[in-house]
Amino acid sequence: MKLDQYKKIAFWPMSMLALLFLFIFCIENFHLELAENNKDFINLIGNLIWALFAVDYFVMLMISDNRKSFFKSHLIDLLVVAFPFLRVLRIGLLVLMLVKLLGELKNKILISVPIYALVTSMLFVTIGAAAVFDAEYQAENANIKSVEDSFWWAAVTIFTVGYGDKFPVTGEGRLYTVALMICGIAIVGTITATLAGWLISQIREVESENKLIVEKLTRIEEKIQKM
């Protein structure tokens, strides 16, 4: 089986696993009752999903025509599946999985730009809120003490509004703040670049059509002058 064929077959199953992993990540980091009462089961499911993504990586590596090139271009993927005990890398895995899922939306520009912006922002806000809540809610002098606080913080951070009423006091929380701001800038930059590219292509198409019209008119004029 070729790598492209495998990716097409595995895309939706792995995407569903990514969404399930997002759900588990959120209920664990928000310390919801569902997660607190079923810690062993939740950990089992989370580790199973992690293992399936590790298998997915190594399957793609084995069937790749150029394994060396695949290895070099997927170093981050390897890092996040190789060290499942690091919480920061769990967030990295989530981001990688969800970016792959959302990548399909880029195929149709007019439809994908607003959807991509909205869905990506919502996902990053959710991931950021869950991560910062887990880091902050028990910290001394913390002001992010509820799920609502963490979502408000994430929303104003990703859009770089920065009201300053809710802010992290731990080093881990501040790291998430920087990461979320970078994600917000990247989202805006990607959308702007996509729209700019589409507008340029439309302008070039119009210019090409105008050029053809001018050439036709020139030929018609030459014929008239010869009559």
Image: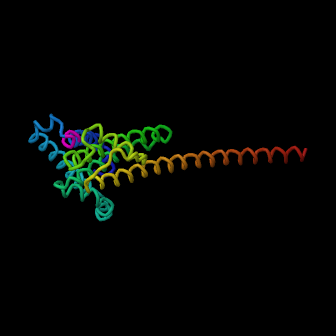
Q: How many marks?
A: 0
Q: Residue 224's spot in the image, x, y percent?
A: 87, 43
The residue sitting at 21% across, 50% down in the picture is 140
Report the colour scheme: rainbow
Q: Residue 59's spot in the image, x, y percent?
A: 23, 53
Q: Nearer the viewer, residue 214 or 24?
A: 24
The answer to whether residue 6 of the structure is visible from this angle is no
Seen in the image, is 91 located left or right of residue 84? right
Seen in the image, is 119 located left or right of residue 44? right
Q: What range is drawn magenta here?
A: 26-30
The residue sitting at 44% across, 43% down in the picture is 107
The answer to whether residue 170 of the structure is visible from this angle is yes
Q: Nearer the viewer, residue 226 or 12?
A: 12
Q: Residue 124's spot in the image, x, y percent?
A: 34, 45
The residue sitting at 43% across, 46% down in the picture is 161
The secondary structure that dominates the magenta segment is helix
Seen in the image, is 224 located left or right of residue 107? right
Residue 27 is inside the magenta segment: yes
Residue 170 is inside the magenta segment: no
Q: Residue 125's spot in the image, x, y percent?
A: 34, 43
Q: Quadrant of residue 86?
A: bottom left
Q: Quadrant of the C terminus?
A: top right
Looking at the image, the residue that sits furthest to the top is: 34
Q: Nearer the viewer, residue 21 or 62?
A: 21
Q: Quadrant of residue 217?
A: top right
62 in relation to 12, above or below = below
Q: Nearer the viewer, residue 170 or 180?
A: 170
The residue sitting at 68% across, 44% down in the picture is 209
Looking at the image, the residue that sits furthest to the left is: 40
